[in-house]
Image (tube, grey):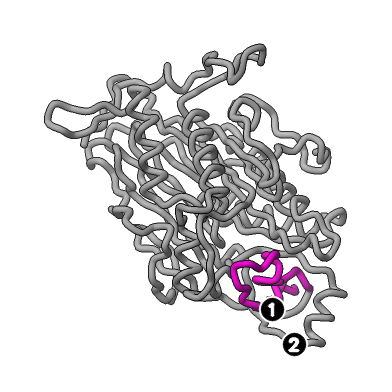
Amino acid sequence: MSKRLRLIVLVTQRPGGASRLARATHGCVERQGGRLNNMASFRLPLLHRANMAPSAPSARNAGAPWTPSRPSSSSSFATNPRFSYNIAASFIAKDRPYDPSTHVFHFNPYNRIQPPRQRRRSSRPDSGHDAFFVSRVNDSGAVAFGVADGVGGWVDSGVDPADFSHGFCDYMAAVAYEHDGAENPPLTARRLMQKGYDAVCNDRSLHAGGSTACVAIAAPDGTLDVANLGDSGFLHLRLNGVNAYSEPQTHAFNTPFQLSLIPPRLAARMAAFGGTQLSDLPRDADVTQHYLRHGDVLIFATDGVLDNLFNQDILRIASRVMVSSGAWQMTNAGGVRCADSIDTLTRARTGDSPSEGSPERTVTLQSLLATELVGAAKSASVNTKIDGPFAKEVQKYYPHEQWRGGKVDDICVVVAVVSEESAGAKSKL
């Protein structure tokens, strides 16, 4: 049986380059072969990876503390606590003004997932080439979610990059929603990514495109399985600290790992004019597992966020929201604890309207976190004076370039607030 091979032509762009397709062009072509690429090292427990070479941390993580993600105690798992995940997303296309009252999605696990082929472009969120999905994993109590960043350079070939990223996310949502719990092997984040990618490659309505992806499955026992491919990523926050975070996977500066679908005619042209053949597949994704606690915050974001906000910026914004809402509380000893119950904060409530005469805004703790992060990333992206992570990377690799400030891009964030369903759940620092 033939395997799909991604063909990549590495063209390291200077920061003013317009297209991410020029960063790395690769596609789905039926041919024998394929290989496993080395990926950036990510020091987390229970990491499943073979022969991976370490690399230096990126500028986006500068100054952020790192601690391994572990269970709070052996006794906590002996009592078999059950966790629920309160999820919201926020997003905005790079050429659109941001409105937190409309550019937001509230996840309802009881809603049915619409079949991917019945989704219309007009029903897509206003997220540009970025996409996201959230779906329950059938009736298992688990939730699958993630983000994908479409490769904008496909526009030069007459292809809408959003078709791939949104279709990819739609397929992953459908796979999770329809998953049979008796299936063996069980559904993992990487396997979900693979199934979504296979579906995109077999969809005859899609002819070309590509995206990065950061995908997760959160189980009701508090375990989180993450597969990250490319320069989207995630942060796991716990009680005013960054408990874990992903490192971007790149072939070179501004050249992220990415899944792609390339038409045969373009692949033939690439072969005729030369280029380096690499294979970025779901199996190349950086896979990690984490143990979650009551009150933890999970943030999955595209590079529209991570190229404009440092990890400590994201932590500061999230901590401000969590503390001001009462979800995280300061102790007399100077530490931080989580409120015994955060259910009232994660339920939908009516907030202040953004302007007089506009409809009332639905607000939850998770949606407030998401909209605050997107708003901050949007502001940073158009700031020409304060250097963000992308500007730091440019200055590192191209010291003679005059790149200052942020990086204008599509922005997408998915936020999950972890809640232990057992009464009297407590988490202290």
SS for callout 1? strand
User: Is 169 rendered above or below residue 97?
Assistant: below
Q: Amino acid at mark 2?
A: Gly
Q: Residue at x 75, y 69 (%)?
A: 28
Residue 123 seen in render: yes
Is 39 on the left-hand or right-hand side of 8?
A: left
Q: Earlier in the sequence, mark 2 or mark 1?
A: 1
Residue on which disc 1 sits: 9
SS for callout 2? loop
Q: Residue furthest left?
A: 333
Is 405 on the left-hand or right-hand side of 75?
A: right
Q: Amino acid at mark 1?
A: Val
Instruction: Report the disc number at residue 377.
Output: none
Q: Residue at x 75, y 74 (%)?
A: 2
Q: Residue at x 81, y 36 (%)?
A: 122
* x then y, percent, for residue 417: 43, 33
Callout 1 crowding tier (Cα within 10 Å): few <14, some 14–19, many ≥20 = some
Is 413 on the left-hand or right-hand side of 224?
A: right
User: Is 361 rendered above or below residue 262?
Assistant: above
User: Is 407 rendered above or below residue 111?
Assistant: below
Residue 187 seen in render: no
In front of the other: 252 or 217: 252
Residue on which disc 2 sits: 274
Magenta segment main secondary structure: loop
Q: Is residue 27 magenta?
A: yes
In terms of image quadrants, where is residue 252? bottom right
Q: Which residues lie in the magenta part?
A: 1-29
Q: CA distance from mark 2 to mark 1?
A: 8 Å
* x then y, percent, for residue 305: 53, 49
Are the residues at dot 2 and dot 1 in contact (C-beta closer than 8 Å)? yes
Q: Residue at x 70, y 71 (%)?
A: 22
* x then y, percent, for residue 383: 53, 49
